Image (cartoon, rainbow, N blue to C red):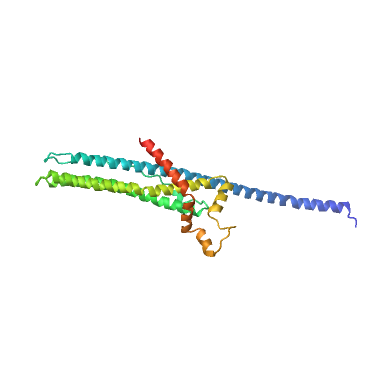
């Protein structure tokens, strides 16, 4: 059957009229989709960058605080030695040292709200945030406690005016200073826990920060259960996103974490010399 030329022309015109807007809408939707994907990737990249900056700042502050406290312990012990060396039976000891002016450890409050698509990273950031807040509160408390120790020593001297006994005063002061210095020394050792946790986050975040494909592949390899074989449902649940999986991932990056901590200790030691 032969179609008239004018009939074919009309249908071409109708199809062209309909196809034009359809292609425009389709291309517009496709462009919007691509733009959204790129914006999400850029936002994720910026989030991971902010985590890197925040964690590095917090780590530096932790090392700085730890070294300040170590130095403070040395000065207190030196003061104790000087008081012990006093032989004058009439000498009251009012000698003192100042508690170091310690700034707050940097804390990025946005860390708790970051969407990182990683169960491990999200939870570790929450743990780090809690550790930083707790450490800052303890540092304030330590400064107040030391000032109170000094006041108690001054008060003891005032009480002894009617019944002078400088050797007892000095011995009491010595014991209080030694107890305080020992407590600070023990606390500085405990700072290694948040330092290690921050280092874990830094190393893991560096893996995730690699190119989008490599970062996604890393997360799939370490955290995801998709396209992986598990003998039992319990084995899959243990591997999946839960607290037990955090310990498993900690072991995966343990060697790198320990190497990083070792290098940091070397740098810290060099700076303090």
Residue 93 against residue 8 in the figure, above or below: above
Residue found 65% across the figure and 48% down from its top: 31
Quadrant in which the C terminus appears: top left
The image quadrant of residue 230 is: bottom right
- Residue 100 visible within the image: no
Residue 189, image x, y percentages: 34, 47
Residue 61, image x, y percentages: 39, 42
Quadrant in which the N terminus appears: bottom right
- Residue 24 visible within the image: yes
Using the image as rendered, state which of residue 39 and residue 226 is in the foreground: 226
Residue 125 against residue 82 in the figure, above or below: below
Residue 225 against residue 84 in the figure, above or below: below
Q: Is residue 130 left or right of residue 29?
A: left
Residue found 40% across the figure and 49% down from its top: 194
Q: Is residue 22 left or right of residue 32?
A: right
- Which residue in the rendered view is the most extreme toward the right? 1
Residue 201, image x, y percentages: 46, 48
């Amino acid at each position: 059957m032969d179609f008239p030329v004018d009939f074919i022309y009309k249908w071409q015109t109708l199809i062209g009229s309909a196809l034009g807007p359809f292609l425009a809408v389709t291309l517009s939707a496709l462009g919007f989709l691509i733009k959204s994907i790129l914006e999400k990737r850029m936002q994720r990249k910026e989030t991971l960058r902010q985590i890197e900056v925040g964690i590095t700042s917090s780590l530096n502050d932790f090392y700085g605080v730890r070294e300040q406290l170590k130095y403070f312990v040395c000065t207190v012990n030196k003061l104790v030695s000087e008081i012990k060396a006093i032989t004058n039976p009439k000498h009251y000891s009012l000698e003192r040292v100042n508690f170091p002016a310690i700034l707050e450890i940097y804390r990025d409050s946005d860390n708790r709200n970051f969407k990182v698509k990683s169960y491990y990273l999200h939870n570790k950031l929450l743990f780090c945030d809690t550790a930083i807040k707790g450490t800052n509160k303890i540092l304030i408390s330590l400064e107040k406690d030391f000032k109170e120790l000094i006041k108690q020593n001054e008060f003891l001297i005032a009480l002894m005016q009617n019944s002078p006994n400088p050797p007892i005063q000095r011995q009491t002061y010595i014991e209080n200073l030694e107890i305080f210095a020992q407590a600070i020394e023990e606390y500085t050792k405990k700072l290694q826990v948040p330092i290690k946790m921050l280092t874990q986050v830094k190393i893991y975040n560096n893996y995730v920060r690699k190119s989008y494909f490599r970062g996604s592949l890393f997360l799939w390899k370490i955290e995801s259960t998709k396209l992986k074989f598990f003998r039992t449902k319990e084995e899959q649940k243990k591997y999946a996103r839960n607290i037990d999986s955090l310990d498993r991932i900690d072991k995966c990056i343990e060697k790198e974490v320990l190497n990083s901590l070792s290098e940091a200790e070397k740098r810290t030691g060099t700076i303090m010399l």
